Amino acid sequence: MAMEKQKRWQLYLIIAVIVLTLYNILPTIFYYSKPLSSPIDAPRAHDVAVSIVDRVNALEDQSKDWLMSFSKLLGIKPEYVELKAEDPRLFRVGFKNSQDADLFKRFLSQAGALIGFVPEQLSLYPGASLNGAQEVLVARQIGIHLDPAEVDQLFKFTPKYQEDGTISKSYRDLVYDRTALIAHGFAGPSETGLTVKAIVESPTSPEAEERILALAREIVDIDKSFAKESTIAKRLFASFMQVDGENPKELTQKFLAKVETLKSTTEARREALIQEQKKKTESGEFLGEAKEQELAALGNQKQTLEAASHVLRSRSAEFNASLSPLSLEEIQKTLATTPINPKNSLQSISLQDRNPFVDFLLIDWGSDRVSVKFYDDVQKIREADPKNESLVYLKNKLNQYIVNDVSLVSRLTDETISPDGETFSVNLNQLTNAQSFLTFDLGSLANKQIHQVVQQLNQTWVPQHADLVKENYPVNLYDAYKKLPAQDQKLGLVIYAPAMYAEAPPQGFNNGSVYVIAKGLDTIIQKYRDNPKSADSELLMNNISELNDLLRKNGFIGYPGSSYGMGPEFSKDFIFELQGYYQPLLTATREDFSVKGSKKLAVLDFTDVEQRILTRNKIDDRIQEDLLKWAEDYSAAQVDLDATRKYLIPAPTKNPYIENFKLSFAKYFRGDDRKILKWGLDLSGGKTVRIGLRDHNNRPVTNPEDLKQATNELYTRINKMGVSERTIRVENNNIILDFPGSQALSASELVQASAMYFHIVNEKFTPNNPTLKDSVNQFLQGVWNEAAVTNRKDVQGVNEIAWRHLGGDDQQTYPRSEAARVLYDNGLRIPSPDDATTGNAFNDTLSAVAIMRGDDYSEWEGQSTPLLIVFRNYALEGSSLTNVQVGYDPTQGNILNFAVKGSYDGNKVVGNPRDNFYAWTSQFAEDKILGTPKENYSHGRGWRMAVILNQKVISQPALRAALRDGATISGRFSQREINQLAADLKAGSLSFTPHILSEQNVSAELGTQERARGIGASLVALALVVIAMISYYRFAGLVASCAVLLNILIMWGVLQNLDAALTLPGIAGIVLTIGMAVDANVLVFERVREEFKISGRIASAIQAGYRKAFSAIVDSNVTTIIAALVLIQFDSGPIKGFAVTLIIGILSSMFTALFMTRYFFAGWVKNPNNKSLTMCEFIGKTHFDFIGQAKKAFIISAIVMLVGSYLFISQKIPFLEWISQVDIH
């Protein structure tokens, strides 16, 4: 029988397998062939700087392309679109006629704001064009062009260590810059001192009265909380007058006079209300709830002012002992002269008794942290285990004061000061193990910014009033202004950027801002105040309004120079401030720059080459995502029912598919961490997340069946997120998730559930209530300060802090602050964290604290904190929504319409969602509260309904009418966000709410030794197999060895394509597969040897050898696969990883051993010179009677099975229990 011929499809299949294998394994080869662990040096940092400049400048061409596409969408064709060379912030867009220009302007403002990448957004420029009505000026967010030739001037490379291992001067300067600001926050002018100074220098006003009351409450609180002989109290009172340029004794007396004046005023107001109450009582009427609250508040204020006055008099010596605050220059000098301890790399900076709690700061150069070190008496109380109620109260009070102080410094310095053991610390690096840095000079950026502001003011603001014309009211840069004579410095616009100068800015000014100072503007306004309706007065106000509008459109905010915190030299001026002038450009870089310390430099951390590859990939992915989002928005706009929407989003200027191909191609050779073979947690480290589950009543889930259900749901969720080689197990009622390698997913993303609830806002305890406004703000500020400093900014942590502030942890319910006491007396009740039952039953006696979404106050509805007090029970939950539909409203943007189900799902059988929803909304709708005390708390509007998604308030519309069958949700959603929200709500959420208890990174060093041993064992096994095969089977062994190598590559490619991670059990599976692959070749070659001896023809021998060995090979491999499938059912991470690797290896070995080698030999035998296969024969002919010895073999096997069973039972191994404890994969 002749050898079967090679077939073309077999060749194509082999080539396809090899190509696919190479395609899958090459990314790993390219990735690991790079010096991943090498630090970023100066040449590499220069390349990063060049790429940043190119990325920012590329926005110019992208904006031009967008303008062309937008014009095409409107059906008009501009004659030119040019970027102004002298002002790169502006595009000149010219049209044939004014009608086209008007159409362009009509839609541009709204369309430009819808561009997904904020630094790329466009707007109409307020100034007039030089070419009349046919030209439109379009403003960009980025106002400068970065000159590639100035890269070395703009960017500086900063290594962390010098070649000798010592700290480099440039890095030390960066740390000192930040540390000096932190020290100044603690030891500079105190917040109370600045407030006292502002009070005594300003006339009486409602704002000044509020500040006096706040300080009076604090003075009384300190006096009550600490013993008279307490050194902490003495330091606190001494810090009250810690301010520059003031005599503490005189300042104390002036403040005392202000307190006495307010006390008299308060008593007069209170007496007037008492008389009104008497008249009402005599006529059988009531004073009214609002005035009753006001009367009670005035009584409390009088008592507080009297007590504060007494303390100021009796402890005046302590107030008079205030020291002058430390200046930045003094702190910087201390830093420069204080040595670093070479033994422990520590450096201490004394605050010289300028802070009541903090003794000194400690720089740990080894761990890159700045720690706060308290006085011994403070630390003693913090670490004490209080034995009685008074000590508990003292400890809580002290911790609250420290939290407020740390929170204040955190806000002033823009630093994250986090708990660190028994103290607090600042992490100096954004990246763990940062080795070098790239700094961006913000001073040069500010210089370019102020020149543009001057140019814009000169070209656009043309006042006609005699006092404001340029001859009398010039526009000057700060340098030119300082050179003017004193009499010429009183009037004019001064453009000032503090970051450009080495000296500290004047009081109230910030290095992170650009200012336009309208010198003497208040003096000019006062001249016309007596005749406000005169032509000159109206012209003056119109010119000032034009200036205000112009600067406001450029991001400036205006306020009087006499505002709190500003120096007295600016009291007659008006100040316009552009905060974070650098932010649009830094955002445009798409890099994680941080701006800390004096805000003169933006700093980008580097670790190694691998980190930069991952960062570059992430940046390119974001650019591609923006393009995809643009394409999605364009497609949605073209089919939108709102006709105008079609003209707001132009067609993308790039093809998303082509760009995606280009990106994939670039990342393929650069190194794509998502397409490489990853090491498992046991070989490379990774992330371990511990999760606790809570039910709808916020109670911990402990039922094993519930835990199993939640585990399955989490397993499904993580699968959908594409996370491979995950390990999930249950441990002590918690769920543990292990993720190998460098996962780009945070724990919060892994367990995020789209849980939505609707709560009514308790308007009585919001800033909308004029009577309790101050107490509410102080209470919420105190809660948020503690939450931020202690890193407990989740809903549960915030509510526990609020509960404690209201005295919940005190047996006598003694609120911690005067503001908390006022709210408690007025009925605010937050339940204990132990009483976590919630529901939808109407209950307006218990409240809870909700958290608004957003990272800063600009997104917090005008509040200084994101906290909002709502009723604890919800009016509606997301699972009760149906018919969820995405919509669009011209005034509200993307919205979500929904209907309410008529009945509850599952075990809820009492009531229905519609009735419960109506029961809540009917109590607080606008038409229902008219004429009731409730309307006083919301200015006559309906109370708000907070829409809470994933524990964040996303919207809080006022209830205009009672709701029952459905409603609409709005919340500034993007198209992608609203679609995702709708999909999540339709799909449902987890049965239980997951809470992240801990998130730990497992060091890669833990698996280094095991990885080396595992790889070494595999290489040794492979080498021995190759040597043995070639030694015994010669040429055939060489072919078999090549097949084994190809088999390993195919396994590699399959595992990588599955995004699996290689673990120790997986390596064991690979080694076993090598042996099985060789075993298949041994069976074939032995059959070939036997057939060749019989026929003497090599072609027929090979053909018969493969045919006869096929069934034995298939049978053995199938039985092994069956065993592996059984192992998979154990659902254990290590066991399952071994089984999956084994199955892949078996299938690939069968392909290489039975298909590829057979194809090779089919071609090999065509050569007439190949007449035999030389093989060794160490073992001669054997004549063993297998059939005759079968009975003995059966008996021996039965004995072994019985003995094994006996030993198994005797050891009492609880097999089923062991199975249940195995890790769930």
Image: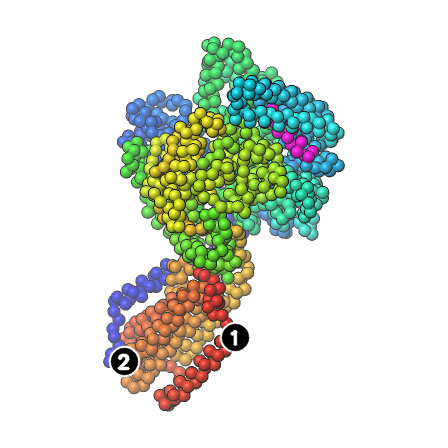
Q: Position of residue 100 (x, y in %)?
A: 30, 26
Q: Magenta stretch mostly in which secondary structure?
A: helix
- Cα–Cα span, label 1 and label 2: 56 Å
| Residue beneath the point at 64% across and 30% down | 217
Asked whether 275 falls inside the magenta stretch, the response is no
Mark 1 residue type = Gln
| Secondary structure type for disc 1 | loop
Residue at 38 percent across and 65 percent down: it is 1050
Residue 562 x, y percent position in the rendering: 58, 22
Position of the C terminus by quadrant:
bottom left
739 vs 163, left or right, is left
Badge 2 element: helix
Specify few, some or many for label 1: CA neighbours under 10 Å numbering under 14, 14-19, or 20 or more: few
Residue at horizontal 65 percent and vertical 37 percent from the top: 186
Say if 281 sits above or below 46 in the image.
Answer: above
Mark 2 lies on residue: 1100
- Res 580 seen here: no
Q: Quadrant of the N terminus?
A: bottom left
Label 1 sits on residue: 1211
The answer to whether 845 is drawn above or below residue 211 in the figure is below
Image spot of residue 566 (x, y percent): 60, 26
Q: Which residues are magenta?
A: 209-224
Residue that appears at 64% across and 25% down: 302
**Is 220 one of the magenta-colored residues?**
yes
